[in-house]
Image: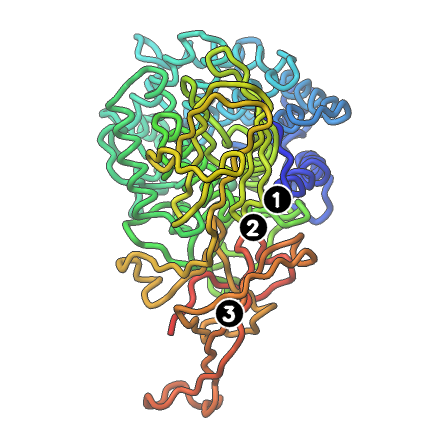
């Protein structure tokens, strides 16, 4: 059991509890003025016959309330709230009322005609919605002990199991948008029912096999697939080949990463080494060649997709919040398979940067796309950049990201530690209380930390326990000191974790001090978009320049590297952030007039300027303006 009480995370989680969760419930019920309607809850009420009407929104609208419910469940686990639980119960009543006698549950087809169900697996998201509903049900039962939704999804999975599988007469399909694979794995872990795991395994193994189910489906429907006309084709769905033959992360980034999560789960639960190897290969493709410094993934708006190695444009990026969230999901699964610091490094990179940037500090507005460079006029006037918004939006017709962000941040405690035998691994540092059983013996300790603003971590033991405490030394950290009860120790370092094996006594303290200097970063030389540019990081945080602090024309700014940074804690700014200030140069426009577009190269006039960097996650909280992460260097 982990209780988070942390200076950094508490305000964010409180904002989600107080503002985000109630706000999203209003949005799901179409009660937020000026926001795009969701139709989500309305669809369930129409599907159950409670009200008359049509299906509204996308075919996958059901999943929004599922993700919201899952977030609510994690919130209730940490902090019971009878009023919120009653609202969630009412949502579950509406959902379950729409379920069909045979277990089927998807409002689009219930309203528009059940005879067409399961005929468009490629694009119609029934299995995707089922997956999210399963995840919600498992979490909600764990939080509240209430089985209504869990029983409903078990009936739904029974129905899916009757429809899909290798047996004669069953459909040989799999979802166009993965998620049900990992959902079934977690359902299996709750129920122990082998059929649930087998179904997950079936969806993973069947994907991309010839004859290709999606081609057969298109032929049956006499329809055409939009993606076949462009560069992606079936790789959009990661169905271009069987999963073990896939070497590069391709296609729609969220689908890809959700698929890899399902593969990792099935690999772990079945002991399938070939599948685990496939996960490792795809992981390497993502994090070594196709990931932004912020943990954003998906370089192209076309297909919301991965493109090719080192193609990481900063201003036309997609970088969907959901994709960074999915990367966190995958990294946690890789970490479960093998404890290695690099996996936790990616969790941290995505979480503190590409995920958190998805939500405004007040919890009420959201980014779908998370750019690393913004020129507001381009977002308005360049068609190829209109997907990039210079400010967060109140809601989206396709509102996958906001509830996804809620469910991740509210389940943060699942990412902090893991254990194996008598080893307790600390992966992420956040303040709170940890209590667990190590081989039947109780281990409890308190964590205090100033992370991510400084690298000081202090553990205070609450129990007398023999244990190996393995503390992660983040990949960004070049030097650290470690003390037990004030005495310096070295510990044994392995795979980025320093191990402290002792007979601990209640009251013992472990103090870890991670040096957290400002680091000026470069990208791999093949990342052509970042050539000649640098980015600034401190600890896990990526920093950015905003027009608000640095004036317009950020492309004319150059950073002197190396340079001295002033590290300044600013409690009143952006909810309390550490800013970084340094000297730079700014190219002046002297000598240019409105009639001259080009001129012979000559003396460039640059002036000294002071640059102020803020954490990337907090950008666009002070009005619309330019922003950039990568700047030219002197
Ligand atoms: Zn999303």
Rendered-image quadrant of the C terminus? bottom left
Residue of label 3: 582
Q: Are marks 2 and 1 in contact (CB under 8 Å)?
A: yes
The N terminus sits in image quarter: top right
CA gap, disc 2 and disc 3: 18 Å
Where in the figure is residue 81, as x and y percent of width and height?
A: 74, 25
Q: Nearer the viewer, residue 465 or 586?
A: 465
Q: Position of residue 281 (x, y in %)?
A: 26, 35
Foreground residue among 462 and 403: 462
Q: Which residue is mark 1?
A: 8
Q: Check disc 2 and report the residue beneath it.
A: 453
Q: Residues within 10 Å of mark 1 (few under 14, many from 20)?
A: some
Disc 3 crowd, CA 10 A, few/some/many (<14, 14-19, 20+): some
Q: CA distance from mark 2 to mark 1?
A: 9 Å
Position above or below: 403 against 152: below
**Which residue is located at x 34 percent, y 18 percent?**
201
């Amino acid at each position: 059991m982990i209780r988070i009480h942390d200076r950094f995370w508490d305000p964010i989680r409180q904002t989600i509890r107080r503002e985000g969760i109630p706000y999203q419930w209003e949005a799901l019920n179409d009660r937020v003025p000026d926001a795009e309607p969701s139709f989500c809850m309305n669809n369930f009420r129409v599907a159950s016959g409670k009200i008359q009407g049509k299906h509204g929104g996308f075919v996958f609208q059901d999943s929004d309330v599922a993700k919201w419910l899952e977030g609510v469940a994690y919130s209730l686990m940490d902090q019971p709230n009878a009023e919120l639980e009653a609202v969630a119960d009412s949502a579950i009543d509406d959902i379950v009322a729409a379920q069909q006698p045979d277990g089927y549950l998807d409002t689009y087809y219930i309203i528009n005609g059940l005879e067409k169900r399961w005929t468009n697996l490629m694009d119609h998201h029934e299995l995707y919605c089922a997956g999210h509903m399963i995840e919600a049900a498992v979490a909600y039962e764990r939080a509240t002990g209430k089985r209504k939704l869990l029983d409903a999804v078990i009936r739904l999975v029974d129905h899916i199991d009757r429809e899909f599988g290798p047996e004669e007469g069953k459909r040989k399909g799999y979802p166009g948008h993965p998620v049900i694979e990992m959902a079934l794995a977690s359902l299996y872990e709750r129920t122990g029912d082998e059929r649930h795991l087998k179904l997950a395994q079936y969806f993973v193994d069947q994907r991309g096999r010839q004859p290709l189910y999606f081609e057969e489906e298109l032929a049956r429907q006499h329809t055409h697939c939009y993606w076949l006309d462009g560069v992606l084709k079936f790789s959009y769905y990661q169905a271009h080949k069987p999963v073990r033959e896939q070497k590069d992360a391709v296609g729609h980034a969220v689908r890809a990463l959700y698929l890899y999560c399902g593969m990792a789960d099935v690999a772990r639960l079945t002991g399938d080494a070939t599948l685990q190897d496939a996960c490792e290969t795809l992981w390497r493709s993502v994090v070594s060649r196709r990931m932004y410094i912020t943990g954003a993934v998906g370089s192209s708006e076309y297909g919301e997709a991965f493109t090719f190695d080192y193609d990481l444009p900063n201003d036309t990026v997609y970088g969907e919040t959901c994709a960074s969230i999915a990367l966190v999901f995958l990294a946690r699964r890789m970490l479960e398979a093998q404890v290695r610091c690099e996996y936790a490094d990616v969790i941290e990179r995505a979480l503190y940067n590409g995920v958190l940037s998805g939500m405004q500090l007040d919890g009420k507005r959201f980014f779908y796309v998370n750019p690393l460079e913004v020129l507001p006029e381009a977002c308005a006037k360049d068609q190829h950049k209109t997907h990039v918004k210079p400010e967060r939006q109140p809601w989206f017709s396709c509102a996958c990201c906001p509830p996804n962000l809620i469910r991740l941040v509210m389940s943060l405690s699942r990412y902090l530690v893991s254990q194996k035998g008598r080893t307790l691994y600390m992966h992420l540092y956040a303040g709170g209380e940890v209590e667990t059983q190590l081989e039947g013996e109780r281990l409890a300790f308190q964590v205090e930390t100033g992370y991510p603003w400084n690298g000081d971590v202090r553990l205070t033991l609450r129990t007398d326990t023999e244990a190996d405490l393995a503390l992660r030394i983040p990949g960004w950290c070049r030097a650290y000191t470690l003390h037990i009860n004030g005495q310096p120790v070295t510990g044994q370092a392995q795979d980025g974790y320093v191990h402290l094996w002792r007979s601990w006594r209640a009251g013992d303290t472990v103090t870890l001090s991670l040096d957290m200097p400002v680091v000026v970063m470069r990208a791999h030389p093949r990342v052509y978009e970042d050539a000649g540019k640098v980015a600034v990081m401190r600890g896990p945080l990526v920093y950015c320049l905003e027009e608000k602090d640095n004036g317009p024309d950020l492309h004319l700014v150059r950073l002197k590297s190396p340079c001295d940074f002033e590290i300044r804690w600013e409690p009143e700014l952006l909810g309390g952030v550490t800013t970084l200030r340094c000297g730079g140069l700014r190219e002046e426009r002297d000598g240019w007039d409105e009639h001259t577009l080009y001129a012979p190269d000559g003396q460039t006039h640059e002036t000294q300027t002071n640059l102020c960097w803020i954490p990337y996650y907090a950008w666009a909280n002070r009005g619309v303006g330019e922003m950039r992460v990568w700047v030219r260097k002197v």
